Amino acid sequence: MAIRPILIIPDARLRAVADPIVEVDEEIKTLAKDMLDTMYDAPGIGLAAPQIGVMKRIVVMDLAAEGETPTPLVMINPEITKFGDEIQVTEEGCLSIPELYYEVERPSTVTVKYTDLDGKEVTKDADGKLAVCIQHELDHLDGVLYIDYLSRLKRDRVIKKFDKQAKLAAR
């Protein structure tokens, strides 16, 4: 079990685009396990590799509630192939923007295509909380944060707060 440090904004790696994974090998399987351990420890329901400073296209998530059997999901090179027409508004948070939650509008259904840990291609339809989580985590792979969907005023306020914290921590 390896719990890795989670990057916090304004770390520039959170704004970078992750590289595709060429092969599902032992290194990727270990990375997926470390990501799940890190996510569970945080605790969170999703984590993308760039959030731990690994610039690869892999995300993990588990929407099981406390007390339920864990249902970990690992997506390698995920890609949303279809967005539904209906929009839902849900409160989102992010392990890289700790302790802040904002309402975000996103499509309520998606279809995602990805490779699993066995190297198999999977196509999955998702709705509700899972659809939101998939969109949130896949955004991380392209350097997009959920605060990018907020008004400019709210986003600037969040960025300013974390810039200030980073400067204080650097002293």
Image (cartoon, grey):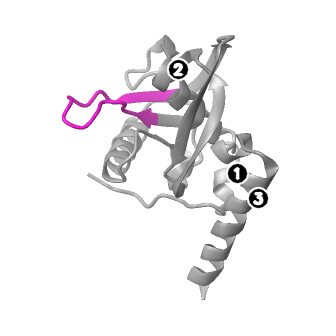
Q: Residues within 10 Å of mark 2 (few under 14, many from 20)?
A: some
Left-right relation of 100 to 26: right
Q: Nearer the viewer, mark 2 or mark 1?
A: 1
Q: Nearer the viewer, mark 3 or mark 2?
A: 3
Residue underneath mark 1: 15
Left-right relation of 7 to 80: left
Image quadrant in which you'd find residue 118: top left
User: Is residue 143 shown to the viewer in this render?
Assistant: yes
Kind of residue at disc 3: Asp
Picture residue at 65% right of the left edge, 26% below the top: 106
Kind of residue at disc 1: Arg
Label 2, label 1: how far apart the Cα atoms are: 22 Å
Kind of residue at disc 2: Tyr
Residue underneath mark 2: 114
Residue 96, how many percent across, how many down?
54, 55
Pointer 2 and pointer 1: residues touching (CB < 8 Å)?
no
Residue 159, how many percent across, how many down?
70, 61
Residue 83, how many percent across, how many down?
66, 14
Q: Residues within 10 Å of mark 1 (few under 14, many from 20)?
A: some
| Front residue of 92 and 9 | 92
Residue underneath mark 3: 156
User: Is residue 54 shown to the viewer in this render?
Assistant: no
Q: In the rendered structure, which segment of residues is drawn in magenta? A: 60-76
Q: Principal SS element in the magenta part?
A: loop
